[in-house]
Amino acid sequence: MMIALLTDFGTKDYFVGAMKGAIFSINERANVVDITHEISPQDISAAGFTLRACYKNFPPETIFVAVVDPGVGSDRRAILVATENYYFVAPDNGLLSFIFDETRNFRVFELTERRFFAETVSRTFHGRDIFAPVAAHLSNGASPKDFGAEIKDYIHLKTAAPRVVSKRETEAEIIHADRFGNLITNLKQSDLPENFALEIGEKTINKLQTFFSEADKGELFMIMGSAGFWEIAAFQDSAAKLLKAKVSQKITIVQKS
């Protein structure tokens, strides 16, 4: 089984290396890959979006270990989610809400069986002492139910969906900003009318592109992104900077006659 890691740890410190060492100590044949360790510190929303955008590109049976954990050491629970094709190991803080929104068949188990944890569990590094060992034991053939009882009261953060305001207007939201400054909205293919104007702050955007270099440098436009959402972009520039826009900012789609 492949084990894929996603954290906000960065790569300057020992944290990622320690997690990998914990995995290999239990399963030295484990196939461990990195998704990213550059999630902004404690940004659960960005972690959820990033995992959602890429997990289906991995082979079936992949174990995803996602550790963005502001509540580490508190009474927040640690969970394992088993779907028909994948496993997800993470804190119970809403990071995996996209699974609960988009997947029909899944089971959630609370991680309580300490025999699968490190001998000593730090109150500040559950990535190394709980999540990594659990993933390693899972890759060695342990069953999800071995790690603890199934639960139904997991944390499920409702994803903001476009909201119809009137016959001609829909309110949407920016859900992510990537490193290029592209602003990913929560608008899917069918949410954008053929003839539209997008209003964000005092700016209006009404141009669609099929690829980036169709536009002039610095020109703002909408484009369908690889994650399946409409994005606001600027060719060879940052839409986020040009618009001074932020995640969770509201936008309005106006259908033109």
Image (cartoon, rainbow, N blue to C red):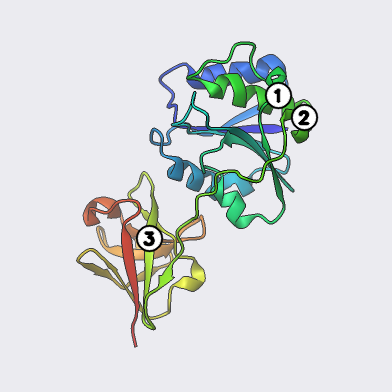
- Answer with mark 1 or mark 3, whichever residue precedes in sequence: 1
Kindly report the distance in space between the C-alpha atoms of the residues bearing marks 1 and 2.
8 Å
Residue 168, percent from left and from top: 36, 82
Residue 110, percent from left and from top: 66, 34
Residue 137 left/right relative to 57: right
- Quick one: label 1, few (<14), some, or many (20+) residues within 10 Å? some
Q: Is residue 185 above or below residue 166?
A: above
Identify the element where label 1 is drawn: loop
Q: Quadrant of residue 20?
A: top right
Where residue 113 is drawn, which disc sits there? Answer: 1
Residue 186, percent from left and from top: 44, 60
- Between residues 181 and 156, which one lies in front from this camera angle? 156
Kindly report the distance in space between the C-alpha atoms of the residues bearing marks 1 and 3.
40 Å
Q: Is residue 24 above or below residue 200?
A: above
Residue with the mark numbered 3: 173
Amino acid type at mark 3: Glu
- Between residues 233 and 106, which one lies in front from this camera angle? 106
Q: Residue at x 62, y 35 (%)?
A: 79
Nearer mark to the viewer, of 1 and 3: 1
- Answer with mark 1 or mark 2, whichever residue precedes in sequence: 1
Residue with the mark numbered 2: 146
